[in-house]
Image (cartoon, rainbow, N blue to C red):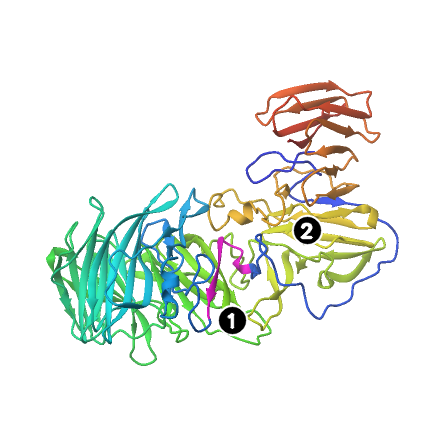
């Protein structure tokens, strides 16, 4: 018998053998007529994630952030991490720091002075160690150069982030002598030891009338583009943050853009500017460490039509394909509309453009909600928001994923497709994507966000096939003897239950959260099954098999006993692929689920390469809620208690015979050896050893080892 392994390869308590074809089995046949289960009209309760939050099983991939958004009307006290007006997330290319919401405050005149003293820069996170998200401690915001008059409104937005900097724009409205004046102030903060520290500020515009800065901010590598409208004239201002003196510089000679709006996009040392309502693209060079922009090219009538609206998303997606080649995706508004890929060549101080023939799935308009395009070297990922469906009776997709790869010779081919259960795309760069998975409530909305790697969105170990959508990283089932797991077959007096659709595809039933229009649904191909305090205890004469794609994990609160007449099998269906991304935001909770609701003492049943006999194991698995005095009865009826222990560890061999007992430290150093050939009870004094994990190994007369994990407190 081999011990089970946790995902890091360390031995944990042995409860039975594991192998590629067999399972752990608790209990033995009892010949009694089964009692059966009634058919439910409503399936399992809403599924719960490892943090105890309601979740659609398809959204168990990636790390989670939970926030509350105020959706009602009127003024209210916006509080950090609690109430806010969510407006997309802020990310920068190739950076690990992000702001959860661009908008931090949007405060009206009612009691505004009560708000201004409590402003804080919050909602800043940093991805570290490949699978962790660190929350950066908030910092107090103080307006450094307030305008003149009675303050009326205040809006604060995050306009840019880098690995160790966060920049915010404060818009302050004041009434003076019956007129409205606006002051715009930009502030910068540095991340030091997980805290935000104020670094500097600049007043961009002071006490101005008839002025407004457009909502869209474009920031990269210290450069910020602002569209400023004053007296019905638009001007594009180039701003630069000087790292050496922690100060902002603003261009004294902005680009005048008439009365129309504008879209800007910074890509490396270039700025692409699309004037609204024009078939025109201006491309500027950015002077290094400066605000100065130099026009390189002005391309007229380069698009197949004036770029059309793209729902709530950007009208242009621009990426650098090679030294002088840039890919641009836009919406062609002619006819029914289509998305097009245009290449711009900026070599030899000139500019030319051409269109690339793309597959039908790239060009098609799926809905009026628009599409995002994530553009990488030789890949373009399209994420299209579909129409939301209420009162549905079956699963549906909120987002349609399809990626295209450059096959060479200018040819692009469709590679993979799948669907996601997202409400919105919050933000993305070429490494990470933030999805707003779900929200519920009215005046106060609960929002759940997921952060995961772009490269793993349609990873082959996430998807099952093109016909099976919404696979789950993990699932915490409530009822293991679900009515729909039985075909009414009785063997040796026990009704057979298996969570299988067909012969091999595992399934679980749940209530799909759908904003008040919930319905019965099924998730297939769950990778990790978690059995814990949420799982109802099995009773009665039943033979229950629970299948997980890669692992079945037992945590505190789960218990099963053959004394109730139950025969239980936990069956991992496949060996964990050796090339699965072990350290990632996407897969971490599948591989290492740490449930915040209960202690993290865990028993892992995973696949391994060796085979062992398929013998029944008699006894119980009981994981106590508080993790103390944990008693585990292994397959030979041996009891080791208390576990964890402070000093004395008791071992009841229950009439079984062993030759030797050995105790090893976590460093695999043997610290105790005992001859137990004539003993039925053993007492080990662990008081002299430091706290930690130890392996107590029993060795029989044939030299076979039975290792067991023990925790010394």
Query: In the displayed structure, does residue 128 sit left or right of residue 391?
Result: left
In the figure, 259 relative to 689: above or below?
below
> What residue sits right under mark 2 in the picture?
533
- Look at the image and tell me in which quarter the N terminus lies: top right
> What residue sits right under mark 1 in the picture?
442
Q: Are the residues tagged 2 and 1 within 8 Å (C-beta)?
A: no
**Residue 467 location, x and y as percent?**
54, 64
In depth, the one of 520 and 712 nearer the eye is 712
Q: Callout 2: 10 Å neighbours few (<14), some, many (20+)?
A: many
- Which residue appears at 37% of the width and 72% of the height? 364
Query: In the displayed structure, does residue 35 sit left or right of residue 136?
Result: right
Q: Picture quarter containing residue 90?
A: bottom left
Image disc number at residue 630: none
Residue 65 colored in magenta in the image = yes
Magenta highlight range:
58-71
Residue 15 colored in magenta in the image = no
Q: Picture quarter containing residue 225?
A: bottom left
Q: Callout 1: 10 Å neighbours few (<14), some, many (20+)?
A: few
Distance from label 2 to label 1 (Cα)?
31 Å
**Residue 18 location, x and y as percent?**
67, 40
Query: In the displayed structure, does residue 169 sit left or right of residue 237?
Result: right
| SS category of the residue bearing label 2 | loop
Q: Is residue 8 visible?
A: yes
Q: Nearer the viewer, mark 2 or mark 1?
A: 1
Q: Is residue 421 visible?
A: no
- Which residue appears at 33% of the width and 61% of the height? 157
- Look at the image and tell me in which quarter the C terminus lies: top right
- Which residue appears at 50% of the width and 67% of the height? 444
């Amino acid at each position: 018998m081999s011990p089970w392994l946790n995902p890091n390869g360390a031995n944990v308590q042995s409860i039975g053998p594991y192998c590629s074809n067999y399972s752990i089995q608790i209990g033995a046949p009892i010949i009694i007529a089964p009692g059966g289960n009634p058919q439910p009209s409503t399936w399992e309760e809403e599924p719960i994630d490892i943090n105890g939050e309601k979740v659609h099983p398809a959204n168990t991939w990636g790390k989670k952030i939970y926030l509350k958004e105020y959706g009602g009307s009127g003024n209210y006290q916006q509080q950090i991490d609690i109430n806010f007006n969510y407006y997309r997330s802020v990310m920068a290319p190739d950076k690990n720091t992000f702001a959860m919401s661009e908008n931090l405050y949007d405060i009206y005149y009612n009691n505004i002075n009560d708000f201004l003293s409590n402003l804080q820069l919050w909602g800043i996170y940093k991805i570290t160690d490949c699978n962790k998200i660190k929350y950066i401690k908030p910092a107090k915001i103080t307006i450094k150069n307030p305008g003149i008059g009675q303050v009326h409104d205040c809006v604060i937005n995050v306009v840019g982030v880098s690995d160790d900097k966060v920049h915010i724009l404060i818009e302050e409205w004041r009434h003076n002598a019956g007129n409205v004046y606006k002051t715009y102030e930009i502030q910068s903060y540095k991340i030091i030891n997980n805290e935000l520290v104020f670094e500097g500020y600049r007043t961009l515009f002071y006490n101005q009338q008839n002025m407004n800065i457009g909502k869209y901010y474009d920031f990269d590598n210290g450069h910020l583009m602002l569209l400023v409208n004053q007296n019905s004239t638009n001007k594009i201002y180039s701003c630069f943050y000087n790292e050496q003196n922690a100060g902002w510089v603003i261009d004294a000679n902005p680009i005048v853009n008439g009365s129309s709006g504008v879209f800007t996009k910074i890509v490396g040392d270039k700025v692409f500017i699309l004037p609204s309502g024009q078939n025109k693209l201006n491309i500027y060079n950015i002077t290094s460490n400066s605000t100065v922009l130099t026009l390189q090219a002005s391309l007229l009538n380069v698009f197949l039509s004036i770029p059309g609206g793209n729902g709530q998303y950007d009208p242009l997606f621009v990426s650098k394909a090679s030294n002088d080649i840039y890919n641009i995706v836009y919406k062609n508004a002619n006819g029914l509309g289509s998305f097009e890929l245009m290449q711009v060549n900026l070599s030899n101080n000139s500019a030319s453009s051409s269109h690339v023939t793309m597959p039908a799935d790239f060009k098609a308009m799926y809905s009026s909600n628009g599409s995002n395009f994530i553009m990488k070297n030789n890949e373009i990922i399209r994420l299209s928001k579909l129409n939301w469906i209420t009162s549905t009776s079956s699963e549906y997709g909120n987002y349609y994923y399809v990626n295209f790869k450059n096959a060479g010779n200018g040819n692009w081919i469709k590679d993979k497709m799948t669907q996601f259960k997202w409400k919105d795309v919050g933000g993305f760069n070429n490494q990470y994507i933030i999805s707003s998975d779900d929200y519920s409530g009215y005046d106060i909305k609960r929002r759940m966000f997921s952060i995961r790697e772009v490269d793993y969105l349609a990873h082959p170990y996430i998807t099952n096939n093109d016909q099976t959508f919404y696979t789950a990283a993990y699932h915490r089932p409530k009822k293991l003897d679900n009515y729909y797991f039985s075909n009414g077959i009785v063997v040796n007096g026990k009704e057979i239950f298996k969570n299988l659709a067909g012969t091999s595809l595992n399934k679980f039933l749940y209530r799909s959260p759908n904003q008040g229009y919930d319905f019965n649904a099924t998730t297939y191909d769950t990778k990790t099954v978690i059995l814990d305090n949420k799982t109802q205890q099995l009773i009665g004469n039943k033979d229950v098999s629970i299948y997980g794609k890669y692992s079945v994990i037992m945590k505190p609160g789960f218990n099963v006993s053959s004394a109730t007449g139950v025969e239980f099998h936990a069956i991992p269906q496949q060996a964990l692929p050796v090339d699965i991304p072990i350290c990632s935001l996407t897969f971490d909770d599948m591989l290492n689920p740490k449930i915040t609701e209960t202690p993290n003492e865990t028993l892992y049943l995973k696949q391994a390469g060796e085979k062992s006999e398929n013998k029944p194991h008699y006894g119980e698995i009981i994981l106590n809620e508080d993790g103390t005095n944990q008693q585990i009865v292994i397959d030979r009826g041996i009891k080791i208690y208390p576990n964890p222990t402070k000093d004395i560890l008791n071992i009841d061999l229950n009439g079984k015979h062993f030759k030797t007992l050995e105790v090893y430290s976590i460093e695999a150093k043997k610290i105790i050896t005992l001859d137990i050939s004539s003993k039925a009870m053993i007492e080990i004094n662990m008081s002299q050893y430091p706290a930690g994990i130890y392996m107590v190994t029993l060795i029989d007369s044939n030299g076979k080892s039975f290792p067991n994990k023990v925790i010394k407190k």
